[in-house]
Image: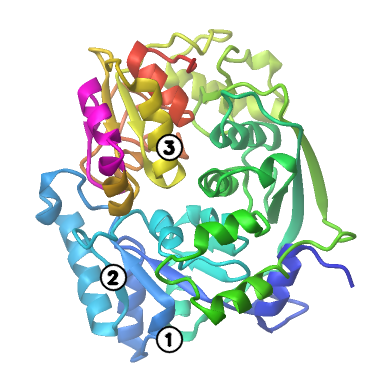
Amino acid sequence: MQKNIIEKIWDEHVVKAHDEGPDIFAIDVMLLHEVTSPQAFAELRKRGLNVFQKERLFSTVDHSIPTDSSRHKPSDPLAKEQIDTLRKNVKASGVKLFDIDSGEQGIVHVIGPEQGITQPGMTLVCGDSHTSTHGAFGALAFGVGTSEVGHVLATGCILQQRPKTMRVNFKGMPPANVYAKDIIMALIQTLGVDGANGYCIEYSGEWIKGLSMEGRMTLCNMSIECGARAGLVAPDQVTYEHLKGKPHAPKGEQWEKAVAAWSHFVSDSDASFDHELDLDLSQLKPMVSWGTNPEQSVNILGSIPKLSDLPEDKKIAGKKALDYMGFDQSRDISGIPIQWAFLGSCTNGRIEDLRVAAEIIKGKKVHEKVTFYVVPGSEQVQDQAEKEGLTEIFKEAGAIVRKPGCSMCIGMNSDKVPHGERCISTSNRNFIGRQGTGSYTHLASPATVTASAIEGKITAAG
């Protein structure tokens, strides 16, 4: 029987299937961080259980860790407690920790791929909703709750309902100033924040084949924002070249065997999906969010919609978003003043993102009324940016280059947008208070964020 990639991975990991309920589902790798793991470890201790197969578990500090010089001694007592607790838990259980100053620390969804931990055909979970990032490698990766983190710690399995499957076919090629971030935002605008509820999505098309792994990770990262359980791209030569030589990737003869096995994880030619969607890329423009969820976006040459133009079931959310953001209907999105700009996160904190931004800002200056944070996604990205001279370019332009961490993506550390101020951000969510109580967030690509930081207002690059 012909199968799609999602069905192939799923069927290889079902320990026991249940017609009337969730399957017992095996997990190959779990990534841990300091926020969603303490309760899970505590539950194991309470039940007298040991960690199952510690070699499949990897941890880092990213959400709460400060990105300035206080990272070694966080002033926030909760952050300090979370970080110290993770260190104690992983030490006691023998789990690998990528700690600060190891040269390997970073955002959990950045370090997994750069370490070669994420591989095609595997199942991967983390107590973080943007675990779908790892689907860029042809893995079935999704976020889980704290109780499920505990299940994987103890058994290597979780209970999961078999998902519906969707294929998004990207048609044509995008203009030169349109990036993966713009395309996933356009898809979310099309589907809505709940349009893919219950689905896992495979992304396909000619554009995908030429897309870098960084671009694929950005694309898969925001799958959750249209309601999908996961998003993935079938592995190919681009995938293999990116993985080869990574610390945890197979070596020698095992490499050739692995590639042969990985090549099986593609959708068969006659495979079917529960739903298929085509998205034409040829006419797309850079995207910017105007509201308080990623669906509420427009192209940068467009205007904030009239409530009367929104579908009936979107009007209430639209009215609340306009009221919160302080916008008039039909206002152009371009030209809105900003006070902050943020380049980073598990969506756009990789070396390719920093290269795009550095090329735009080289020889220019950050606007005098804008604070521009540049936060590498990992210590490896940080080191590479320094070697390539990108860090110096940012500093000369007046940007503030921070240490690796989730930073301003989420108001769970000291990097916050002040109350009443507006930030254009490469992060993945613009919910109310996401970047700080009373702050306003506009999602965009690294190119748009950088151009806006220079101009002091929302502006397209180029």
Q: Are marks 2 and 1 in contact (CB under 8 Å)?
A: no
Instruction: Say how many tags the image has.
Output: 3
Residue 337: x and y in percent read 37, 11
**Separation of marks 3 and 2 at Cα, in angstroms:** 26 Å
Q: Residue at x 60, y 54 (%)?
A: 238
Residue underneath mark 3: 353
Q: Which residues are magenta?
A: 385-405
Residue 372: x and y in percent read 28, 26
Q: Residues within 10 Å of mark 2 (few under 14, many from 20)?
A: many
Which badge, 3 or 2, comes first in the chain's sequence?
2
Which residue type does callout 2 highlight? Leu
Quadrant for the N terminus, please.
Answer: bottom right
**Separation of marks 2 and 1 at Cα, in angstroms:** 15 Å
Which badge, 3 or 1, comes first in the chain's sequence?
1
Residue 152: x and y in percent read 47, 78
Q: Secondary structure at mark 3?
A: helix
Judging depth in this view, the residue of 381 and 370 nearest the camera is 381
Residue underneath mark 1: 53
Which residue type does callout 3 highlight? Asp
* Residue 452 visible to the viewer: yes
Q: Secondary structure at mark 2?
A: strand
Which one is closest to the eye, mark 3 or mark 2?
3
Residue underneath mark 2: 97
Q: Are marks 3 and 2 in contact (CB under 8 Å)?
A: no
Judging depth in this view, the residue of 319 and 171 nearest the camera is 171
Which residue type does callout 1 highlight? Gln
Q: Residues within 10 Å of mark 3 (few under 14, many from 20)?
A: many
Q: Are marks 3 and 1 in contact (CB under 8 Å)?
A: no
Look at the picture and state if 148 lies above or below 347: below
Q: Residue at x 70, y 43 (%)?
A: 195
Q: Residue at x 33, y 92 (%)?
A: 48
